[in-house]
Amino acid sequence: MRSLTPRQWTGIALTVVALPALTVAVWPLLVFLRELFPSGVSVGRGLVIASLVVIVAVAANLIRTRKQTSFRLWSLILTAWVVAIGAVAGMVVLIWLVLGTPGLDLPTALSPKALDAIGTRAFAVVAGLGGVALLVIHYRRQRTTEADADRAERAAAREVTKLFNERFTTAYTELGSEHAAVRLGAVYALAHLIDDAPSEEEAQMVIDVLCAYLRMPYEPRPDEPSGQSDQSGLPTTAVDLGQLRGIEPDVQREKQQEAKEEHQRKVLEFEASQQVRHTIIRIIGNRLREDTCWRGKNYDFTGVVFDGGDLTGAHFSGGTVSFDGARFSGGTMTFAMAQFSGGKVSFDDAWFSGGKVSFDDAWFSGGKVSFDDARFSGGKVSFDGAQFSNRMVTFIGAQLSGGKVSFDDAQFSGGTMAFAKAQFSGGEVSFIEAQFSGGEVSFGRARFSGGKVSFAKAQFSGGKVSFAGAQFSGGKVSFTRAEFKRGAVFFDGARFSGGTMAFAGARFSGGKVSFIEAQFSGGTMTFARAQFSGGTMHFIGARFSGGTTTFTKADFNDGKVDFGWAGFLGDLDDFKRARGACPAGLRKAREQATPGVLLYPAAWEHRSGDETSASEATTSSGS
């Protein structure tokens, strides 16, 4: 016999449960009907016979079934019925208890009204049990439908993943083709794969493949052939020379032609490979300009050779982007208007040896960008108009021996830029007209042995710029016509043994500039035409043992310039043509200096009551 169908199990359950329940509900009616039967007829025997008929009919119906069903359905229906009957019984008992457990007033006769009420209640019982069964059946059907939908969804996802893997396999296989056109098509195919990637992991996987292609060995553009013929196998006898005279010009021309053709072939191969690489960079830039799934991913450009590329306006908003050990050897690589707002971008050990790299108008607003141990030996790196607001940019241990790094018009409103221990042995670093309104720029313990660092016309209205412990043994550091309104610039403990430090035409109207315990043993320090109308400048503990420090035509109208404890031991330090009040501590420094070393106007010979230096005041208060 085959398994029962859900409908048949439902019939059995209705028969087993509903029939007894209905019998109990209509028992008074059965008693009334029994009285209507003739006294000789057995009502009990008739009920038994009727029950047997019903059971046989149900069994016959079950035998004819050919469909299969689950054992769980009818058990769920029975459980639901038990819960429903229990809930109704519980509510009846609860109400009975609330009413004070009144007794039952059983009727002695069955009236038509009572008979109607009994029929109504019996129908309600059967309908309620049937409703519960239907609810269970619909719930089971809904679960089955959801399971089917879930299986269909998983199957569809597997199909999508399978199709993605097939497309990916085809594309990266073509990326290894020896034909540049095929590789170029594979690059576009991989880019579309990232756009259609079913998950973040697949998108990152394809990005890793594109970055890995850029990391592959990349030979530079081949040099022009020298045009010199091969000198091996030269003739050694007059006979050999005579035989060679007739064919030597043809052989040379043939070799030159072969060399030229070989060079052209290599150039074509190089340019074809270059186009593929530049296309990858351009596609990455295009996708990062828009809010796509390309953002927030990791990009590994470690050791990549860049001879051009466009990442203008790219958003590096998360993830890790590595240019560690990359070489920028030619062409133009631009990060102009790029936004670095999260994650980490690293140019550690990168080598800028040619071409131009532009960060003009870039926005550094979070996370960290590092150029630690990078080398700038040629070309130009530009940060013109860049904004640094709450981000750390480090050049720790960087070497600038050539080329130019420009921060002209840059805005430093927050975050940190560190050139700690950087070496400036050539080239130029420019902060012309940069604005320092917040954050910190540190050149602590940096070494300036050549080249030029310019802060000309820069505005210091907040934040901190530190050259503490820096060594200036050559080159030039210029603050010409810079404006110090607020904030602080520190040269504490710096050593000036050569080169030029220029504050010519600078305006000190606020903030603090400190040369505490700085050592001037050579070179030139000039404050010619500087204006001191506010703020504070400290030379406390500084030592002037060589070189030249000049304040020619400097204007000490207001503010506070303190030379307390400064020692003037060496060459001429000229204040002779300075104007305004004598700086604090300078008169005492002149008394202790070597005669003729420190010159200042005759008007400063006479002490006024308010010319006590901060250091003198500290000493007197301490005693």
Image: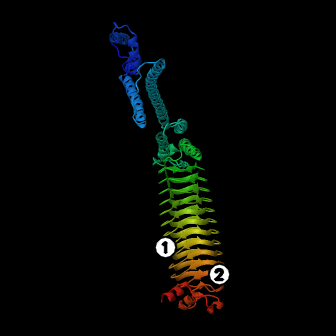
Disc 1 residue crowd, few under 14, some 14–19, many 20+, Cα 10 Å: many
Residue 469 tag number:
1
Q: Nearer the viewer, residue 427 or 447?
A: 447
Q: Is residue 291 above or below residue 67?
A: below
For the residue marked with disc 1, what is the amino acid? Answer: Gly
Q: x and y percent of residue 444 in the render?
A: 50, 69
Describe the element under mark 1 as helix, strand or loop. Answer: loop
Residue 483 tag number:
none
Q: Is residue 510 above or below residue 105?
A: below
Q: x and y percent of residue 115 in the render?
A: 46, 18
| Residue 471 visible in the displayed image | yes
Relative placement, left or right, of 582 versus 493 is right
For the residue marked with disc 2, what is the amino acid? Answer: Asp
Q: In the rendered image, which quarter is residue 56 located in?
A: top left
Q: x and y percent of residue 222 in the render?
A: 53, 47
Q: Nearer the viewer, residue 52 or 99?
A: 99
**Which residue in the structure is indicated by mark 2?**
558
Dot placed on the residue nearer the N-terminal end, 2 or 1: 1
Q: Is residue 222 above or below residue 32?
A: below
